[in-house]
Amino acid sequence: MKKNLLLIATFFSVGFSYSQVLDTVSLNAGYSNENYYNLDNGNKVSVVRDDWDLAFASDGVGFGTSTIRINGAMLDELYKYSNDINDWGTVDTTGFDWSTNQLVNSDTSWTTGAFENTTPTGQFDLGWGTYDINFHFVDGDKVFILKLANGDYKKLIINSLISGVYSFKYADLDGQNLVNTTIDKSNYTGKNFGYYSIQNDQELDREPASNTWDLLFTKYRTILGGGTNYGVTGVLTNSDVTVAQVNNVGDVNNLSHSGHNYVSVINEIGWDWKSYSFSPPGYVITDSLVYFAELPNDDIYKIIFTGFGGNTTGDFIFTKEKVFSVGLEENLVKSELLNVFPNPVSDFVNVTYVSTEKESKLSVYDLMGKELLAKNVISNSGLSQQELDVSHLAKGTYILMLTSENSRKTQKIIIQ
């Protein structure tokens, strides 16, 4: 099932669940920014997307990692020119096979950047260099060509990674405008990457601490069918967040987080929860798709996308709901809708539910969030059943809600 962007589920905004929140994260028009997002507190850190060319891993993406990524979303392109650094002085692109030697970032793991995405030539080949097992540093052994977003070409060597300091040099292909510089991991303690702009010859500290964000809303490059390297806009997860994707869900609002396959692939949410429709024009959201994100503290959030603004606004619209938290799980199961019958219904609907709280309320809302029917009920300890007369309501789709002191549960009903 699909919903057009214009058919956003308005009822989420009225708070049908204490923990369910409708939120919007924006990349701005033209996707000029990217946004680091914290699921627990909703904090957003927006940074300019196109101000860097190289990202050097600090210890936030794994102790001792030597990962170096490129800004592929800004259309930077990396090519392996030679496995011999002695070829630095004789770089000549005449007859060079650009397609075969292009390198791209992995979009499944932060620890495989474009510089690592090469075929290993030995046991300790880490991509841009070789690990020295005796002295515990990485020695650069390859010459690369970097095409910048402005169309300039630079030749580049990562000289070494020693004691947490990357040393590298770059120049025009003819050797002019040579720059030798370094990036020190210690300047980015607690962060995943430190950044560098070759176009501006500038080191950049632009990323929030890795323990302050869970999702990165951004533009990145992926490999589509046929090996096409293509720019997409979507969501990547932090390295310590796992995600379960559940497809073809009939009732997305009442799906449990249990029993699904949680993976550490950073693009598990990715970009393909949406597609573009030309008639009528606009983005279409898959409304039978649910994501569960498990955080390092074992909290689990349910995420359902409801809209996407595309290049015009860069807005991601979604609901999030904390569905599991150590110490709070008891409250989350105090009330539960078990069965609503018949559904579709024309006159009387029977609602079976379980509640450990004495007083609850059954309500019916339209999709604009207006309460049309309410009934206060006294619950037995455990299983209860109530009958609601809905014969006076017009045909259509409604939301049935069970409200108790500590939770709210919803169920879609159809009146015919």
Image: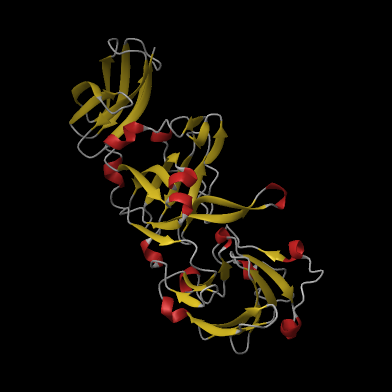
Which quadrant: the C terminus?
Answer: top left
Counting from the top left corner in percent of width and height, residue 148 is at: 60, 67
Q: Is residue 163 above or below residue 149?
A: below
Nearest the viewer among 343 and 219 is 219
Q: Image height check: is 395 above or below 237?
A: above
Q: Residue 298, how many percent across, how many down?
A: 38, 55
The quadrant where residue 97 appears: bottom right
Judge from the rendering whether residue 268 lies leftward or rightward of residue 254; answer left or right. right
Does the rendering let one see residue 307? yes
- How many marks overall? 0
In front of the other: 410 or 184: 184
Given residues 310 and 107, the one toward you in this image is 310
Report whether residue 161 is seen. no
Vertical arrangement, residue 12 with respect to residue 269, above or below: above
Q: Is residue 395 left or right of residue 225?
A: left
x%, y% of residue 402? 27, 29
**Looking at the image, which residue sits at the far bottom?**
135
Where residue 121 appears, as percent x and y from the top left, is: 74, 75
Residue drawn at x 42%, y 46% is: 315
Q: Is residue 378 left or right of residue 195?
A: left
Figure check: 68 above or below 349: below
For the point 52% across and 47% down, the residue is 261
How is the structure coloured here? secondary structure
Res. 401 image quadrant: top left
Residue found at x 55% / y 34%: 277
